[in-house]
Amino acid sequence: ARAFGLNQWHNTAMIEIDLAAEFPGAAGYLNTASIGLPPQRGVSALTSAISAWQRGDARAPEYDVAVAAARKSFATLVSAPERAVAVGNQVSALVGLAATALRPGDMVLCPEGEFTSVTFPFLARGDLEVIEVPLPALAESITSRTAMVACSAVQSATGAIADLEAIRESAAAAGTRTLVDATQAIGWFPVDARQFDVTVTGAYKWLLSPRGTAFMTVGAEMQELMRPTYAGWYAGESVWDSIYGLPLRLATSARRFDLSPAWLSWVGTAPALQLISDIGIEAINGHNVGLANSLRRELDQSPTDSAIVSLEVAPGFEPARLEGLATAYRADRLRVGFHLYNTAEDVAKLVAAIRR
């Protein structure tokens, strides 16, 4: 851990983590903004769970332990009470639940070029007015007509960070509800979910989890406004007593919005989130942003607070030309992201490849 600069005091004890052992194949991997790499502890947990399943030893209620552990870890990461956290499988489904709080004709304000998992659920309703404005103008564009403002904390294509404090203050002054997609943020960027009516987070990127796990935080007022459209047995106050028969008996917390979990995905998610918690968002933020800014300096760019770097490329550029480096191509630009398994060597390799 010292080699990565990621030591920090945690619960009065120094946590030292061998990141090379946790991520043995991470060299040159710069594509966390697309898919995060699983830590070895997550892979081991999944391997054990798959073996138990194959032997016929799997028992459904036992998976609740992983779901509960992941919910608790996530709540800690976003400074929210556990009773405000719902679990799901993808961001768009959770945004769709948040959209049930709106009335026909309500106006939703979003940034231009926003990830469509945030915008499509509102548009698909067919009875809402969805307006786009440039991200820097989002806060100042909120008016009393704006029923909800919805945006990503960190933009997927560019890595641009939204001014969440300005958005929150403007929304509060206008009586506007707030929804923040923290998928590209949680895991390296601090977000206090208590400041917003709803947050949604897919865990398969910066939270290093299997695809198929997601989280939603819901404020107390929004819990009353939203409809649990997808309610099933897992949304019951007592899950295993909610499998059969009437009447409706949903949880009194945000668990009423829970979607039935994809069990194996949660087995891998719980240890991944514990790793993030053990290291700490502050330490990871300093590490990630430090590497991203070292790349920017090498390319004569100004530093920013983002772990995602978006680079202009010449027409006809093919990411495959960056041999041995995993990157992405988004919005006609080269996108790279730095996470806790990256090192200065990855920056040097990328700079050399770009110059070639």
Image (tube, helix red, strand yellow):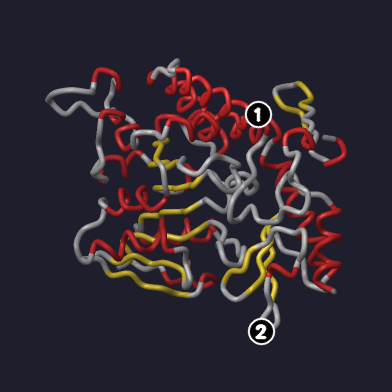
Disc assigned to residue 315: 2
Q: Position of residue 129 (x, y in %)?
A: 28, 70
Secondary structure type for disc 1 = helix
Relative horizontal placement of residue 313, taking residue 45 as reference (left or right):
right
Sooner in the amino-acid sequence: mark 2 or mark 1: 1
Q: Is residue 78 above or below residue 333?
A: above
Give the camera-side residue of 257 and 148. Answer: 257
Question: Going by the picture, which residue comes out furthest to the top?
Answer: 57
- What type is the residue that disc 2 sits on? Pro
Q: Quadrant of the C terminus?
A: bottom right
- Quick check: 348 left or right of 61? right
Q: Amino acid at mark 1?
A: Arg
| Most foreground residue, 112 or 115 | 115
Q: Which residue is mark 1?
A: 41
> How far separated are the C-alphas under marks 2 and 1?
42 Å
Identify whether 264 is placed above or below 122: above
Front-most of residues 35 and 157: 35
Name the residue rendered at 63%, 27% in the picture.
44
